[in-house]
Image: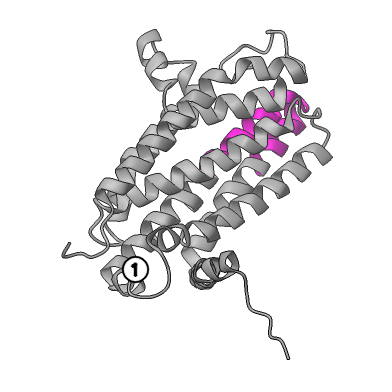
Amino acid sequence: MTTTTASAPARRRRPLVALAKAEYLQFRRNTTLLVMGIGFPVAIPLATFFVVRNQEGVSASLATTTFEMFVLLALLFVQFYSVLSMVTTRRSEGVLKRLRTGEATDWQIQVAPMVPGAVITLVGTALVTAVVYAAGAPAPVNPVLMAIAVLAGIAIFSLLGLATSALTKNAEAAQITSLPIMALAFMGLSTLRSTFPDRLAQLADWTPFAALSDLMSIGTSGRLATAPDSATALDFSGTFAEIAEPVAILVVWTVLALELTRRNFRWDDRG
């Protein structure tokens, strides 16, 4: 009689799956995080979209603005803040330290809190996309770039949440320590960058959300987020020629966030 055993990769994944399920259940029970995860990122951009659509009609620029608003709110109030608050709470309760004595590796313990926000962000992305294009918005020029922007944003802002937790004493303090990252993200909004003086605008272009905004804009309308509507829109193949700078900026921020997490992440309040 033979028995079937799980493969080594499957066994290695088990702790991550179990931890991710546990984090999702905790997230679902947190009313505040649920309201922030659903009400803020989804309802506000869609409400704005329909108000403007009824007044001015639907356009590619309106779709771009809607997606930019959604991605900003989702990454800040769902992904970043949920990772920051959950990791800080788990550390204060001694959970992180205890988990390190089990089968889970350090990276699995760190990744698990990212999963609930990522799931809600991806579901919200699908919902906003379906509503916007069902309501008559022009088809996106390059959906691949839109997907890359969302996935890269989830990764970067999750890592920034882990890095910021090192400076956060408890869940209440997260309301203060999260402000610099939120301010940095808002600097990348295309509507703000277009009003900044030249030097400040150039600096803002190097913020992580500015790169995400540019990728999202190129994907939806074929134009940079700060380009005027009169600029000639790129076609599908032409969009790939314009993504080198935003992709490079995202790579730099990913490496920076990884290094900050590696150097500063704390497993114990006494550590």
Q: Is residue 173 visible?
A: yes
Mark 1, Cα crowd under 10 Å, few <14 / some 14-19 / many 20+, is some
Image quadrant holding the C terminus, namely bottom left
Q: Is residue 142 above or below residue 17?
A: above
Q: What color scheme is it? A: one colour
Locate residue 49: give its quadrant. top right
Residue 123: % across, % down: 67, 53
Residue position for label 1: 90
Residue at 38% of width from left, 33% of height from top? 184
Q: Quadrant of the N terminus?
A: bottom right
Residue 208 located within the stretch drawn in magenta:
no
Q: Is residue 223 above or below residue 69?
A: above
From the viewer's side, name the closer residue of 237 and 176.
237
Q: Can you say whether 177 is above or below 22 in the image?
A: above
Number of on-image labels: 1
Q: From this viewpoint, which residue is outermost toward the bottom?
A: 1
Amino acid of disc 1:
Arg
Give percent across and percent down for residue 166: 26, 52
- At a point 53% along the width and 73% down the height, the residue shown is 18
Residue 171 appears at what percent x and percent y? Answer: 31, 62
Residue at the location (26% across, 54% down)? 168
Q: Main secondary structure of the magenta part?
A: helix
Return the x and y of residue 51 as percentages of the image width and height. Answer: 69, 36
Q: Examine the rendering and report whether any part of residue 189 can be seen.
A: no
Label 1 element class: helix
Q: Which residues are magenta?
A: 47-73
Q: Nearer the viewer, residue 16 or 239?
A: 16
Locate residue 111 relative to residue 220 in the image: left or right. left
